[in-house]
Image: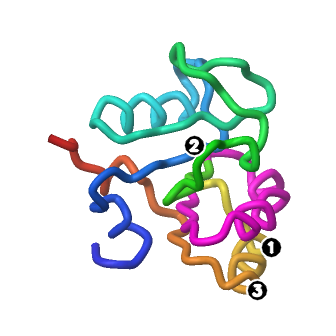
Amino acid sequence: MSDPVSERLDLPDPYIAVVGATDHPNKYGSVIYRDLKSKGYRVVAVNPLRETVDGDRCYSRLDELGEVPDIVNFVVPPTRTLRLLDDVAALGDVAVWIQPGAADDAVRARVNELALPALIDACIMIRARSKE
């Protein structure tokens, strides 16, 4: 797969915000966060309902991060994805990776309106490789 969004995983030290990260072991927000972390990616958890994820600080909002992420990975229902797309656009040069189930027609339309680099309905775990 070669596209501008997935290619960001090949940056020297990509920074990935996982929106919907959680400690609930059966939720994709947990599986994806831990998978990326175990592969050596710098990940940050974003979830207003959590203080920590996997022992790491969890942020309530994207604008609280001390650094602009290269990728914002959405693992939330489409209504939450839609509400946060404008926040992503305000960050600047950020790509969105929207997991299967986190997008609907309204999300797709807003991504196009905002001209965000996006990969929709694709699993980041399949593309991500160990950073060695």
Q: Which residue in the rendered view is the most extreme toward the front?
A: 66
Task: Give the x, y percent position of residue 47.
Answer: 72, 34
CB atoms of marks 3 and 1 within 8 Å: no
Q: Nearer the viewer, residue 120 or 95?
A: 95
| Quarter of the figure with the C terminus | top left
Spatial CA distance of label 2 from label 3 is: 22 Å
Height in image: 12 above or below 89? above
Q: Which residue in the rendered view is the most extreme toward the top?
A: 55
Nearer mark to the viewer, of 1 and 2: 2
Earlier-in-chain disc, 1 versus 2: 2
117 left or right, relative to 4 = right
Identify the element where label 2 is drawn. Answer: strand
Q: Residues within 10 Å of mark 2 (few under 14, many from 20)?
A: many
Identify the element where label 3 is drawn. Answer: helix
Query: Which range is magenta?
Result: 75-98
Q: Residues within 10 Å of mark 3 (few under 14, many from 20)?
A: few
Q: Residues within 10 Å of mark 1 (few under 14, many from 20)?
A: few
Q: Name the residue: 58% across, 49% down.
A: 67
- Residue type at mark 1 is Ala
Residue for badge 3: 113
Height in image: 46 above or below 122? above
